[in-house]
Amino acid sequence: MIKNILASLAFPVAVATTVVLAPAAIASNISVGPSVGISNYSLSVGGTGVFQVTPKIDVAGTLDYSPIDKVFSVLSVSAHGHYNFQVGQKTKVYPLAGLSYHRLSVKSDYLGLNMGVGGVGLDIGGGLNYDLNKKLSILTEVKASIGTIRSANLKVGALFKL
């Protein structure tokens, strides 16, 4: 009888354990953080999120905003794949490739303008992550976007592992 009770509880306990522990396992593979950069437009501020699919493969998303002046600004949203090469104990370098969407906005109260143009681009580049400790790393990336709106930028940021 006890054997039957334990057998009937095995599957629900396994499911409950998976449901409770899976988000923690997924969260431990996610890093997020702020970044600053410089592009052919101007300085930019933004954020980066990285999901580690395997120790060698990451999927990353970025959001960057470049206020060029009082009239022009650029908003960029990107999704990239990284293939990591471990260089030393704390450093990894990676090529990146992905897609981005850039929106160039023009706003002038003086001229009565409020318009924008956007387009998709192919991103290529590379980056480096240096682990300061188990929860914090420094990131630097160089990438070019080829498409409707062309850009090149250099970014430096921090990644906090969740």
Image (spheres, grey):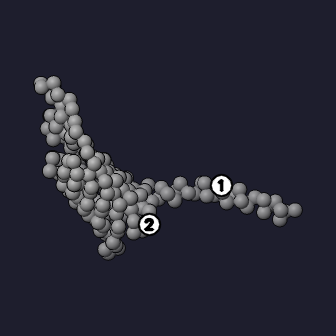
Farthest residue toward the bottom? 88
Picture coordinates of residue 162 (x, y %)?
A: 44, 55
Picture coordinates of residue 86 (x, y %)?
A: 34, 73
Check disc 2 and give the amino acid type. Thr
Q: Which residue is mark 1?
A: 16
Farthest residue toward the left? 110
**Which of the 4 image quadrants contains residue 60?**
bottom left
Q: Give me the residue at 31% from left, 74% from top.
A: 87
For disc 2, the neighbor class at 10 Å (few under 14, some 14 to 19, many from 20) is few
Q: Nearer the viewer, mark 2 or mark 1?
A: 2
Q: Secondary structure at mark 2?
A: loop
Number of callouts in the render?
A: 2
Picture coordinates of residue 9 (x, y %)?
A: 75, 58
For the residues marked 2 and 1, what is the alpha-carbon distance in whole angstroms?
Answer: 25 Å
Q: Give me the residue at 18% from left, 31% from top.
A: 107
Q: Nearer the viewer, residue 107 or 135?
A: 107
For disc 1, the neighbor class at 10 Å (few under 14, some 14 to 19, many from 20) is few
Where is 9 relative to 73, above or below? Answer: below
Q: Earlier in the sequence, mark 2 or mark 1?
A: 1
Q: Give me the residue at 81% from left, 59% from top.
A: 5
Q: Secondary structure at mark 1?
A: helix
Check disc 1 and give the amino acid type. Ala
